[in-house]
Amino acid sequence: MTSKGQNGTCEIQFPSSCEAIDEFSSREDKSTTYRFTLIQSVFKALGLSEKVCLRVNEVGMLSLQLMIRDDSPITTFVEFLICADIVEDDLSLTGQQG
């Protein structure tokens, strides 16, 4: 998993037998761009979460489902849906103009 931005690059490699990942599947390598301000809105809930389900669909829609528990007997689930940025190359593929 790699993240690139104006302030640098961060790359995280997960071993195939990693406790942090229950399941991983991918048909192909994919590169998608998201606005940091949208990703940033997830951080507070991410810090409180016990489990996270991360999915990216064919068009780059990012889904983050977080399971949050506190002292109460109720388990709370929070979901964030984040659309991928449209890149100029994407527009030329679809025939649209910016």
Image (spheres, helix red, strand yellow):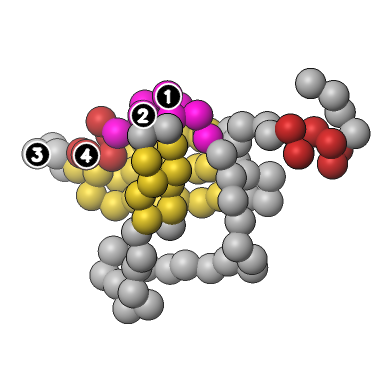
How packed mark 1 is, by other alpha carbons closer than 10 Å (few <14, some 14-19, many 20 or more), is few
Q: Secondary structure at mark 2?
A: helix
Q: Specify the amino acid type for callout 3.
A: Asp
Residue drawn 64% across the image and 68% down it: 27
Q: Nearer the viewer, mark 4 or mark 3?
A: 4
Q: Specify the amino acid type for callout 2.
A: Gln
Pointer 4: what residue?
A: 47
Q: Is residue 75 left or right of residue 62?
A: left
Q: Specify the amino acid type for callout 1.
A: Thr
Pointer 3: what residue?
A: 71
Look at the image and say whether residue 66 sits in the magenta stretch. Answer: no
- What range of the chain is rendered magenta? 34-43
Q: Which circle marks residue 40 in the picture?
A: 2
Q: Is residue 54 left or right of residue 57?
A: left
Q: Nearer the viewer, mark 3 or mark 2?
A: 2
Question: Which numbered disc flags the more N-terminal residue, 4 or 1?
Answer: 1
Pointer 1: what residue?
A: 37
Question: Which numbered disc flags the more N-terminal residue, 1 or 3?
Answer: 1
The answer to the question of whether label 4 and label 3 lie on touching residues, with beta carbons closer than 8 A, is: no
- Per the model, the C-alpha gap separating discs 3 and 2 is 26 Å
Q: Secondary structure at mark 1?
A: helix
- Per the model, the C-alpha gap separating discs 2 and 1 is 5 Å
For residue 97, above or below residue 93: above
